[in-house]
Image (tube, grey):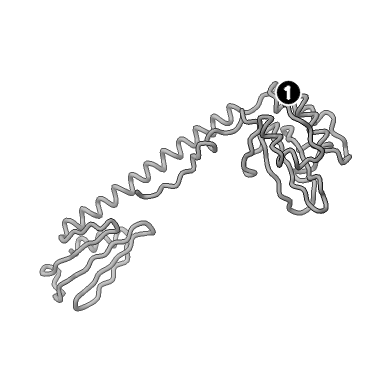
């Protein structure tokens, strides 16, 4: 028993023992909870009977069985560590695939971005939707024009033209389109495209937002260049079963 308690101590588990009909409990870090109950009034470990309980309902009663249970927990932890390493390796591979599939200069996203960059004004004219729409259509994207910039997202125009909505946290690549929601002060919203260096609408912007303050927006990318890792949900919860 002393050996078992020593093992528990090494594993970082808190151990508390009471007198009399003693109850000893320990709890592992976050994942599993176990209980050892001493049902003898004697304080002599050699004459007591220990019952070890786990969350799954299994019970063991000897020090050897307790040691084996701890070994099983260690093996389970190693299995989870292996699964995490496997997912990490797969994610790295998917990122490499994404990098290798970035749009080249002859791709539709790059053509649209180059067109927008070529005709961009030095200051806003208020016609961002017209400029970005023409740039997209010049690259072969087909859709019916909308009167307001925000409608390219809300009416499904970009989605029907072959774009997918991606996380705003994804690294930006050439041809990505951002659509800002409308507001009371800006009823038409805003649309812009990334040319590889700057965000361009009807003018070349100084940054990702043409506004001051924080405003809601969505990011869109040609579906042919969307990272498959995000579609397959590679960030998986490693829940115990």
The answer to whether residue 113 is seen in the rendering is no
Q: Which residue is mark 1?
A: 140
Q: Is residue 180 above or below residue 10?
A: above
Numbered disc 1: secondary structure:
loop
Q: Residue 23 at what x, y percent from top left? A: 24, 72
Image-based side of 228 in relation to 33, left or right: right
Q: Residue 150 at what x, y percent from top left? A: 76, 42
Q: Which residue sits at x=19%, y=76%?
A: 21
Q: Residue 180 at what x, y percent from top left? A: 74, 45
Q: Which residue sits at x=37%, y=45%?
A: 81
Image-based side of 52 in relation to 46, left or right: right
Identify the image quadrant of residue 38: bottom left
Q: Looking at the figure, which quarter contains the N terminus?
A: bottom left
Image-based side of 92 in relation to 221, left or right: left
Q: Is residue 189 above or below residue 118?
A: below
The answer to whether residue 91 is seen in the rendering is yes
């Amino acid at each position: 028993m002393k050996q078992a308690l020593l093992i528990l101590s090494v594993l970082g588990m808190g151990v508390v023992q009471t007198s009399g009909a003693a109850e000893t409990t320990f709890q592992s870090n976050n994942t599993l909870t176990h209980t050892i109950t001493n049902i003898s009034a004697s304080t002599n470990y050699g004459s007591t009977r220990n019952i070890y309980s786990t969350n799954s309902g299994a019970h063991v009663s000897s020090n050897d069985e307790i040691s084996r249970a701890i070994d099983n927990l260690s093996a389970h932890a190693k299995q989870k560590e292996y699964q995490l390493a496997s997912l990490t390796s797969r994610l790295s591979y998917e990122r490499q695939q994404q990098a290798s599939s970035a749009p080249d200069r002859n791709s539709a996203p790059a053509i649209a971005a180059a067109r927008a960059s070529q005709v961009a004004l030095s200051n806003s004219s208020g016609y961002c939707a017209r400029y970005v729409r023409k740039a997209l259509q010049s690259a072969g994207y087909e859709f019916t024009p909308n009167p307001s910039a925000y409608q390219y997202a809300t009416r499904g125009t970009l989605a029907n033209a072959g774009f997918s909505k991606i996380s705003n946290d994804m690294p930006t690549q050439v041809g990505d389109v951002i659509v800002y929601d409308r507001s009371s002060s800006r009823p038409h919203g805003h649309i812009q495209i990334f040319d590889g260096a700057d965000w361009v609408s009807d003018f070349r912007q100084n940054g990702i937002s043409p506004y001051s303050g924080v405003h809601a927006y969505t990011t869109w990318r040609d579906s042919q260049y969307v990272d498959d890792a995000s579609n397959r949900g590679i960030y998986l919860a490693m829940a115990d079963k």
